[in-house]
Image: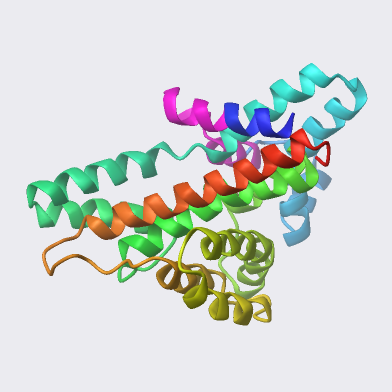
């Protein structure tokens, strides 16, 4: 069921076009801004822990309903729908396509504008290269969601997506929390890079990243990817090959884990 739900969600995300309102981020933000009558509830929501607990209530409700119903078909449908909403990032897809079109036509200014959109979606500074930005978007919007879905079911995917998308304070404590929840998906994803890329160059970096807890997820992902695959542009004016090579790398990596999951499912181990 896990494999079928992931394949269905991934296929729907690539083919089905929905409005911007059908993004988990917008649903979470609406929920966070929902006005509740009652002073105690509003007061509780103002605290840091209360804000987080309130944000993940929808995910817990979904989990509770599925556990109560104990229906395999319902669980499959809801899991696929939850994954679909969690991995939807149409703005990134559009910005990436427009970036390639502008870069191919030689419109450097427009390409930079679309790269800036990708950097903003990845929450990276303006100096971040396109390869790093694409890697980070893939990690947080695709790979990490699937990892937590496989580990904890639909509630794991929705809780991660909620913590990723919810409105939160910009402080050191929250940054540490984000580093913690991204640590395991980063190490699993980059382990795949070793297997689909240059193992001998990337392996030492991956092994050194294991002891890097909890900081360094972004640096670990980008450095290991650069070691596993040659991301150097073909020439000075080439700004598309790096993006295309990065996307090819993450696609091969995703295919590797899907094949592995298929083998485990056929063998009855998952």
Q: Position of residue 88 (x, y in %)?
A: 50, 36
Q: Is residue 134 left or right of residue 77?
A: left
* Residue 37 visible (yes or no): no
Look at the image and tell me in which quarter the N terminus lies. Answer: top right
Front in this rendered view, residue 33 or 219: 219
Reply above or below: 215 against 154: below
Considering depth in this image, is 205 or 153 the residue closer to the camera?
Answer: 205
In the rendered image, residue 160 lying in the magenta stretch gets the answer no
Which residues, given as a range, are shown in magenta? 9-32
Q: Is residue 206 left or right of residue 173?
A: left
- Residue 129 falls left or right of residue 163: left
Residue drawn 13% across and 48% down? 104
Please determine whether, in this image, residue 195 is positioned above or below residue 146. Answer: below
Residue 108 visible to the viewer? yes
Displayed quadrant of residue 262: top right
Q: Determine whether 63 is above or below 170 in the image.
A: above
- Residue at the (77%, 48%) spot, across then down: 151
């Amino acid at each position: 069921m896990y494999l079928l739900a992931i394949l269905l969600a991934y296929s729907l995300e690539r083919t089905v076009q929905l409005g911007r309102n059908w993004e988990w981020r917008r649903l979470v933000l609406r929920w966070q801004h929902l006005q509740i009558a009652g002073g105690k509830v509003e007061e509780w929501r103002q605290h840091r822990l209360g804000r987080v607990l309130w944000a993940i209530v929808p995910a817990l409700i979904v989990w509770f309903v599925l556990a109560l119903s104990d229906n395999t078909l319902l669980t499959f449908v809801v899991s696929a729908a939850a994954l679909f909403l969690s991995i939807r990032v149409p703005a990134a897809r559009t910005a990436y396509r427009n970036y390639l079109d502008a870069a191919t036509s030689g419109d450097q200014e427009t390409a930079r504008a679309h790269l800036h959109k990708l950097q903003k979606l990845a929450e990276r500074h303006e100096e971040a290269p396109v390869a790093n930005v694409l890697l980070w978007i893939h990690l947080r919007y695709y790979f990490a969601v699937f990892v937590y879905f496989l580990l904890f079911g639909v509630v794991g995917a929705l809780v991660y997506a909620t913590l990723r998308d919810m409105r939160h304070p910009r402080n050191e404590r929250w940054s540490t929390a984000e580093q913690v929840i991204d640590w395991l998906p980063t190490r699993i994803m980059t382990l795949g890079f070793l297997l689909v890329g240059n193992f001998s160059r990337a392996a030492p970096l991956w092994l050194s990243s294991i002891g890097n807890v909890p900081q360094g997820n972004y640096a670990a992902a980008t450095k290991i990817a650069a070691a596993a695959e040659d991301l150097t542009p073909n020439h000075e004016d080439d700004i598309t090959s790096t993006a295309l090579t990065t996307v090819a790398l993450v696609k091969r990596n995703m295919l590797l884990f899907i094949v592995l999951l298929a083998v485990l499912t056929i063998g009855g181990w998952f």
